[in-house]
Amino acid sequence: MTVVTFTAIPEVDLADWSADPVEFAHRVRQICHEVGFFQLVGHGVDADFIERHIRHQQRFFALPEATKATIDKALSPHFRGWERVGAELTGGLPDLREQLDLSTEHPVRGLQLDPPYLRLDGPNQWLADDVLPGFRAHMAAYFQRLAAVADTLLAVFSVGLGLEPDHLRSVFGERPLSFVKLIDYPPTPPDGAGVNPHHDAGFLTLLLQHDAGGLQVCNPDGEWVDVAPRQDAFVVNIGEMLQEMTGNYFVATTHRVIADEARQSSAWFHGPDLTTRLDPLPLDASFSDAVAASARHASAGFMARRSEIESGVDGIESSEGAGVYGQQLWNYYCRSYPSNVARHHPDARS
C-alpha cells in the first residue's frame, strides 16, 4: 500500500483561487488528502482586524476569574461560555487550557427534544458591554469574516473533488451552526497537554495562532510536526465530517498542543445545520481507489464516543462515524463535558 508522509505543513495562498481555480483546487485537494493541514495566507482578513481581535481576546482572559465565572459554561444547556483550565476532556484526559466558547446563535428548538442534539441551538453567554467594551460587536464581525473564508474553502474543496462549486455549501441547510473557541494556554507541565491528541469534529477548522507555537500535527510515521505561529495565516485542517463524507479521502489528522510558554489562539469550527446528514459525496471511483491504496486512509478512525472510551477504546480509534452533524457535536459534548450533560440533560443518552 502507498504511504505518503510529511515533515512540514504546506502553505496555500487563497489569492491563487481566482487566478486558476481548477489547478488551485486540485493542489488543495491533494494537500487535504495527504496532510489534512495547511497554512492559509491571502485570505482577505486584514492585519488590523487580526490585531484588534488579539487585543479583545487578551482583555477577556485578563478579567478576574470571578467576572468570567458569571458566564461559566456549566450554566449553559447549549455548552456556551467560559471554562477553567482542565474543564474539557479529550480522549478522557483533561486539557490544560482556559476557554471561551461561542456559537452561531439560533432560537432554541427545545430542551426536551429527541434526538438530544436538537437541543444545541440557543444563545451564547455574554459579558455586559460595560465590563468588556466592544467585545460582542467584534465577535459578530469575526463570525462574519471567518464564515466567508470558510465558505470559499468549501467551494475550493468542491471543485477539487470534481463537484459543482456550491455543492458542499448547499448541504449546510437553513441554520448553519459554527462555533469558535478563544483559548488561553498556560505553559504545559510535564506529562500533560494543552489539548490532548484528537481530531476536529466539524467540516473544517480555521485556527489563528496569536503569538507562540505549540500546535503539533502527527504525520503517518508517528512523528509530531510543529506548526509555526503566523499572524498573517490561518491554519486550516480537515474535520471528521469531511473525512466521513469523502469516504476517508480527506483525512482528519491527529494533532495536539504542547505549550512551552503561555500562548493564546482562536479556533473557528465551520459547521452546517444540526440536521445535516453526512451522506457520502457523489465522487468519482478514483477517490475510493486512492483510499484503498493507502493504509493510513483505509484504516482512518474517528473520535470515540464517551461509552467507547469508558469501555477502553482509544480516543481516536472508533470505526463508526456519526451520520448526522448534530450527532457529531452531541458525541463531542458527551465525551468532553460529561458533567454538563448530566446537569442539563439527565435524560439523554451519552
Image (tube, helix red, strand yellow):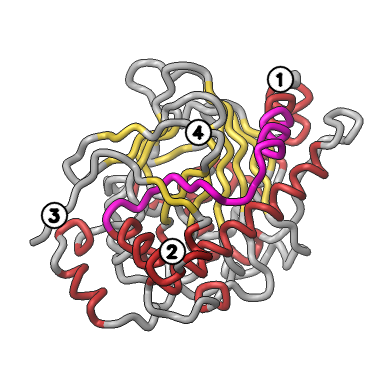
Residue at the disc numbered 1: 62
Q: Position of residue 109 (x, y in %)?
A: 73, 67
Residue type of the residue flagged with mark 2: Met
Q: How crowded is mark 3: few (under 14 residues within 10 Å), some or many (20 or more)?
A: few
Looking at this view, name the residue that lies furthest to the left: 1
Range of magenta residues: 34-56
- Which is more toward the observer, 201 or 208? 208
Q: Where is residue 328 in the image (x, y as percent from the top left)?
A: 48, 61
Q: Can the viewer see residue 84?
A: yes
Residue at the disc numbered 2: 241
Q: Is the residue under label 3 in contact with that under label 4 (CB below 8 Å)?
A: no
Q: Position of residue 91 (x, y in %)?
A: 37, 41
The nearer-to-camera label among 3 and 2 is 3
Give whichever of discs 2 and 1 has the lower sequence position: 1
Residue at the disc numbered 3: 3
Tell me the element at label 4. Answer: loop
Label 3, label 2: how many angstroms apart (C-alpha)? 23 Å
Give whichever of discs 4 and 1 has the lower sequence position: 1
Q: Which residue is drawn at 71% across and 39% down?
A: 49
Give whichever of discs 4 and 3 has the lower sequence position: 3
Label 3, label 1: how many angstroms apart (C-alpha)? 46 Å
- Left or right of 194, for residue 310: left
Residue 54 is inside the magenta segment: yes
The nearer-to-camera label among 4 and 1 is 4
Residue at the disc numbered 4: 230
* 37 w.r.t. 329: above or below: above
Q: Which residue is drawn at 51% across and 62% down?
A: 153
